Every structure is written in structure tokens, then in C-alpha cells.
């Protein structure tokens, strides 16, 4: 596992990761002015590491630190995608939206709105809609695709909405068609906010909680 974290004045979680580094690699980025504005830099750091250290046939998943992954289901989704590569004669592995898929989404234009951290001006992005993309809570693809996206990122204007920039803008520039951005057929990840540890282990209890 590769953990990418930003150093902050009260970065207790980062300190924990550094102490825990005997079990996985930690990439610690210096300072934190970009924590919100340049959050994609953390993803790019892990993409660069994967490109330089892993075979192209390996798989890459990006996820937020408050998401919990059912690894067995993730393996099943990846295996299904491998079969679809042959079935549909895709030239490479697809982009799997293991959390949510954004088919049509408009840039957030309200500078002082409730979601102002996602504000994007027309100078930053002039188009009325974002390209088809994965919601950045969690998504997966191959290291081969990641390496190509990372190379394209070096010459592509940065967009603060990191999931749209990576799985939408860079992916489109790579030439990967929309039909290769696919949504998982069943639940793979859970957003941990608002749930107890036991609820996270028990998918059915979370479903009951959401319907009451």
C-alpha cells in the first residue's frame, strides 16, 4: 500500500502513517497550502510512484482516507473488467468508478456558495459541462493507463477538481472513450463518515440505517 499525505500543523494522521511505515510506503508532501486547491498533486505523486515502480500489468486504485474497501469485491470488479477488455476489444484496461460515476456534471460557479471549495471560474474551465468522470472517493485502473495519464498531466493545464481532471480531462486527452469509464455493478466501497466501525463491517446495517 502507498499512502500519500500532506504535512499539516496538526497532522496526527500523517504521524500515525509515518510510524506505521514498516507495513507500507508513505509519501509525505511538504507543507499544506495546496491541501484543497491542489489536492490532485497527492494523487499525481502516487501515480508517479506506481509508474516508476510497478509493472504495467498491475492495477492502481485511488481513494480518500475515509473510504473503506471490500477488497474481495474490488478483485471481482477488476476481473470482470479484464473480461470486458477482450469482449469489447478495448485497447487497454478501462477506468472503473468504484464509488460513483458522473455522467453529466456542471462546474460549480458560485464563489460564495455552500460548496465553494469546488468553485471553478470560467477562466479556469470555460466549458458548461465536465467530461464523463469518476467521483474521486475511489476509482481503479491499470498501471499502464496511470503511466500514460501521468505523462499527459505534465503538459495539461491543472484543474482543481482532481477527480474530473484525472479521470475526465486527462482521460479524454489520452483518447480513452466515454464507454470505457464504467461504474461497478455492485457496492465495492463505503464512505466511512457517519458510521461506526461495526456498521462499516456490516453492510446490511448501513443499508437499514439509510432507509430509516
Image (cartoon, helix red, strand yellow):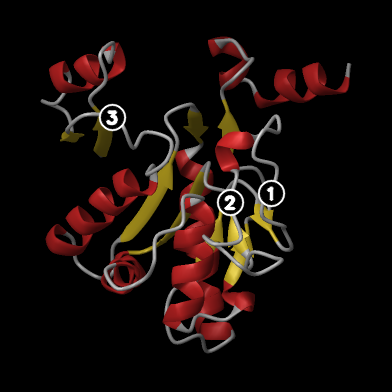
Q: Is mark 1 on a helix, strand or loop?
A: loop
Q: Position of residue 188 (x, y in %)?
A: 58, 43
- Name which residue lies at 56% across and 76% down: 84
Q: In this view, does 21 lie above or below 177?
A: above
Q: What element carries label 3?
A: loop
Q: Residue 109 carries which label?
A: 1
- Label 3 neighbour load within 10 Å: few <14, some 14-19, many 20+: some
- For marks 1 and 3, give the CA distance: 25 Å
Left or right, 181 with respect to 143, comes to right
- Name which residue lies at 42% across and 41% down: 37
Q: Position of residue 74 (x, y in %)?
A: 49, 48
The quadrant of the picture occupied by the N terminus is top left
Q: Nearer the viewer, mark 2 or mark 3?
A: 2
Q: Residue 156 carries which label?
A: none
Q: Name the residue under label 3.
A: 32
The numbered mark, 2 or 3, whose residue comes first in the sequence reads 3
Which quarter of the picture shows residue 9?
top left
Amino acid at each position: 500500500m502507498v499512502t500519500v499525505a500532506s504535512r499539516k500543523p496538526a497532522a496526527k494522521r500523517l504521524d500515525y502513517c509515518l510510524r506505521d511505515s514498516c507495513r507500507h510506503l508513505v509519501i509525505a508532501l511538504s507543507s499544506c497550502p495546496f491541501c484543497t486547491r491542489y489536492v490532485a498533486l497527492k494523487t499525481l505523486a502516487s501515480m508517479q510512484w506506481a509508474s516508476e515502480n510497478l509493472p504495467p500489468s498491475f492495477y492502481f486504485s485511488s481513494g480518500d482516507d475515509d473510504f473503506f474497501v471490500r477488497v474481495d469485491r474490488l478483485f471481482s470488479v477488476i476481473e470482470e473488467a479484464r473480461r470486458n477488455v477482450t469482449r469489447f476489444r478495448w485497447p487497454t484496461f478501462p477506468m472503473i468508478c468504484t464509488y460513483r460515476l458522473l455522467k453529466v456534471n456542471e462546474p460549480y460557479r458560485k464563489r460564495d456558495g455552500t460548496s465553494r471549495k469546488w468553485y471553478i471560474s470560467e477562466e479556469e474551465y470555460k466549458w458548461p459541462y465536465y467530461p464523463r468522470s469518476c467521483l474521486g472517493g475511489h476509482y481503479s485502473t491499470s498501471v499502464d493507463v496511470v503511466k500514460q495519464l501521468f505523462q499527459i498531466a505534465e503538459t495539461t493545464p491543472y484543474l482543481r477538481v482532481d477527480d474530473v481532471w484525472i479521470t475526465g480531462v486527462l482521460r479524454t486527452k489520452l483518447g480513452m472513450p466515454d464507454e470505457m469509464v464504467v461504474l461497478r455493478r455492485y457496492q465495492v466501497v463505503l464512505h466511512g463518515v457517519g458510521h461506526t466501525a461495526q456498521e462499516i463491517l456490516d453492510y446490511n446495517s448501513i443499508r437499514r440505517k439509510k432507509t430509516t
